[in-house]
């Protein structure tokens, strides 16, 4: 007698609904459950009917994008480029702003998985979220370390930090402060700090870092930067790991009777089109958003086709020569 869906469910000790979800790749399922269902199908020599096979192979042409916030110029421009390029390839996009809240990110992931997305492109800072440990869902990360098997697309953070620090030293600065993200994030962006420290030590200069978490409120950033000016009255240059913080520092410097670049040299990081338009005077390191988005989609398509991919893809950065350094 030809085995039925009920037989597979009974042998796998799961419900008929679960078997159907495995066949249709619908919703979040643990790898253990998926393996149990396929083991049962193999033992019973169960062959899904034509409709089920179509559902099993079906692509929804939906890609999920999860980023901290699109209000940040870098993430906003990156998401815009991703959406445009994915649309031209026939994909629809669902965007989630996680605000770096693990619970919110998990909820978004569950919603995306229930909508049967074909894959995910993520740029969030949260790690060890169970839904990312899904062998059946192609995922690509941008500038973030997610899980060991998720490829990372990033700019050359070390070279960017090296260029920025060397620029300030070449301009004559010796007391150079770096505004860095928190150590606990363990992202490729931390290489900017590594490059800063290595370059400073190369010239026998003392590295001085102030940590500013991406997530903290604006008023808290103001407090940190005010403290920096108070504690370091003889500061000669600042390398900020993002342009938004550099813009705040430009404004606050006036409160301490410091002029940029006359008294303090300043260089930022990201170099988005928006920031270069609003603050063309800000010297900064440009991350290649166009190339990053193209490479992320290319790698995701490779993952969708079960092709081998690298662990890391590092793209070049360039210096925007403003007048602040």
Image: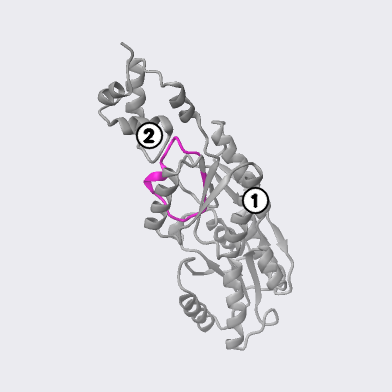
> Cα distance, mark 2 to mark 1?
31 Å
Q: Please, what secondary structure does the residue beneath circle 1 have?
A: helix
Q: Is residue 177 visible?
A: no
Q: Answer left or right for 134 relative to 40.
A: right
Residue at the far top: name it.
1
Badge 2 is on which residue? Answer: 21
Is 187 located above or below residue 17 in the figure? below
Which residue in the protein does label 1 denote?
Answer: 84
Relative side of 101 to 175, left or right: left
Q: Is residue 122 magenta?
A: yes
Locate residue 197: give its quadrant: bottom right
The label shown at residue 181 is none
Quick check: 82 above or below 134? below
Viewer-side residue, 270 vs 20: 20
Q: Residue at x 63, y 85 (%)?
A: 258
User: Which span is picked out in magenta?
Assistant: 120-140
Where does the image place residue 263, in percent across and percent down from the top left?
67, 82
**Tally of numbered discs:** 2
Q: Position of residue 190 (x, y in %)?
A: 53, 57
Q: Where is residue 26 drawn, in percent x and y? A: 41, 37
The spot of residue 157 in percent (x, y) is 60, 55
Magenta span includes 132: yes
Which circle's residue, 2 or 1, is located before the other in the chain? Answer: 2
């Amino acid at each position: 007698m030809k085995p039925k869906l009920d037989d597979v469910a009974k042998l796998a000790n799961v419900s008929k609904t679960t078997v159907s979800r495995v066949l249709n790749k619908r919703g979040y399922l643990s790898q253990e459950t998926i393996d149990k269902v396929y083991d049962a199908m193999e033992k019973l020599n169960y062959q899904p009917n034509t409709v089920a096979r179509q559902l099993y192979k079906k692509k929804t042409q939906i890609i999920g994008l999860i980023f901290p916030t699109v209000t940040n110029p870098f993430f906003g421009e990156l998401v815009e480029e991703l959406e445009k390029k994915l649309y031209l390839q026939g994909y629809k996009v669902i965007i989630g702003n996680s605000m770096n809240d693990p619970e919110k990110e998990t909820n978004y992931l569950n919603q995306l998985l229930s909508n049967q997305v074909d894959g995910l492109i993520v740029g969030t800072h949260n790690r060890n979220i169970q839904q990312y440990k899904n062998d059946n869902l192609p995922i690509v990360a941008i500038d973030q370390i997610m899980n060991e098997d998720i490829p990372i697309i990033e700019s050359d953070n070390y070279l960017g930090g090296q260029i920025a620090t060397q620029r300030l030293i070449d301009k004559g600065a010796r007391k150079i402060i770096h505004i860095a993200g928190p150590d606990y994030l363990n992202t490729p962006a931390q290489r900017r700090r590594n490059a800063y420290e290595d370059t400073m030590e190369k010239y026998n200069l003392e590295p001085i870092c102030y940590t500013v978490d991406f997530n903290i409120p604006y008023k808290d950033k103001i407090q940190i930067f005010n403290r920096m000016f108070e504690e370091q009255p003889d500061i000669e240059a600042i390398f900020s790991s993002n342009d938004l913080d550099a813009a705040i520092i430009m404004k606050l410097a006036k409160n301490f009777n410091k002029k940029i670049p006359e008294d303090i040299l300043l260089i930022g990081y990201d170099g988005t089109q928006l920031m270069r338009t609003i603050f063309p005077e800000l010297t900064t390191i440009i991350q290649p958003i166009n190339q990053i988005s193209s490479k992320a989609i290319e790698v995701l398509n490779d993952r969708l086709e079960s092709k081998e991919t690298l662990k890391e893809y590092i793209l070049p950065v360039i210096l925007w020569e403003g007048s602040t350094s």
